[in-house]
Amino acid sequence: MTVAVFFGCTFIAFGPAVALFLFTIARDPLRVIFLIAGAFFWLVSLLLSSLVWFITVQISNKNSASQQRGLLIFGVVLSVLLQEAFRYGYYRLLKKANEGLLALSQEDTMPISMRQLAYVSGLGFGFMSGAFSVVNILSDSLGPGTVGIHGDPQHYFISSAFMTLAIILLHMFWGVVFFESCERQRWWALGAVVISHLVVSCLTFVNPHYQGSLIPTYIILSVMAAWAYLCAGGSLRNLKLCLTCKDKDFLLANHRPR
């Protein structure tokens, strides 16, 4: 049973992200490099926030439960702000890198567009965030022990998997909206990304009342997905053509002679 829980939760958390990587990124070495770089930037932001949180915990009163909870909230907020700051820093770096690639290229167009970079870097942020969020939980799911045997909530593992899935996809959508907002200098949209990230992170404090965190998180996920789709150049007409298989450009692009 523990093995089934482990693999089930792993596939829920990482299945869609791995599929996106395999079908849209893995075949392009340049995209793979930018994805790994994005994951590295997220990792550095986590390192800095962990260092600050560790120092504050050491100098605080460890016997005060309210103070420790306040420090935990402070750590979450600091981590989110650092992640978004590093996302902006990564955007500036990619902007310079893309200009350099254009100068070296013999073609008039960039080898990879900023929208593609936004998607790839967002998925890199999501992969690393999801891995650090759920890896210890997946390790515990292998046993020994049974969740809920003493009357605790029994949906801990599967709820954590669905939350990790949402966080990974949200990082991808946040990346698309964030980069597009930077390109068009829509600072209110940047603020919306940061606020939604803070809200989703703070919703985890509602646990173990998982319905109180998962339902709002997936509502925000749906809104950000629609927003990212529009930022990427999508429209209702394009969506209708794609779903009805009447998008001639898409069909021609995916046609392979036999």
Image (tube, helix red, strand yellow):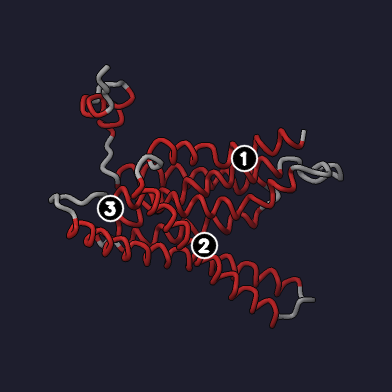
Q: Earlier in the sequence, mark 3 or mark 1?
A: 1
Q: Are marks 1 and 2 in contact (CB under 8 Å)?
A: no
Please state which of residues 5 and 182 is positioned toward the viewer in this rendering.
Answer: 5
User: What's the CA distance linking mark 1 and mark 2?
Assistant: 21 Å
Q: To which quarter of the image does residue 238 belong?
A: top left
Which residue is tagged 2? 43
Name the residue rendered at 65%, 43% in the picture.
159
Name the residue rendered at 25%, 58% in the picture.
98
Quadrant housing the C terminus: top left
User: What's the CA distance linking mark 2 and mark 3?
Assistant: 22 Å
Please state which of residues 107 and 19 is positioned toward the viewer in this rendering.
Answer: 107
Q: Residue furthest bottom?
A: 59
Task: Identify the amino acid type marked 2.
Answer: Leu
Task: Identify the amino acid type marked 3.
Answer: Met
Residue 256 drawn at (x, y percent) = 27, 23
Residue 115 drawn at (x, y percent) = 29, 49
Q: Are marks 2 and 3 in contact (CB under 8 Å)?
A: no
The disc label shown at residue 114, or none: 3
Q: Earlier in the sequence, mark 1 or mark 2?
A: 1
Q: How many marks?
A: 3
**Vertical comparison of 189 with 11: above or below:** below
Q: Secondary structure at mark 3?
A: helix
Q: Residue furthest right?
A: 150
Task: Identify the amino acid type marked 1.
Answer: Thr
Q: Earlier in the sequence, mark 2 or mark 3?
A: 2
The disc label shown at residue 10, or none: 1
**Vertical comparison of 148 with 39: above or below:** above
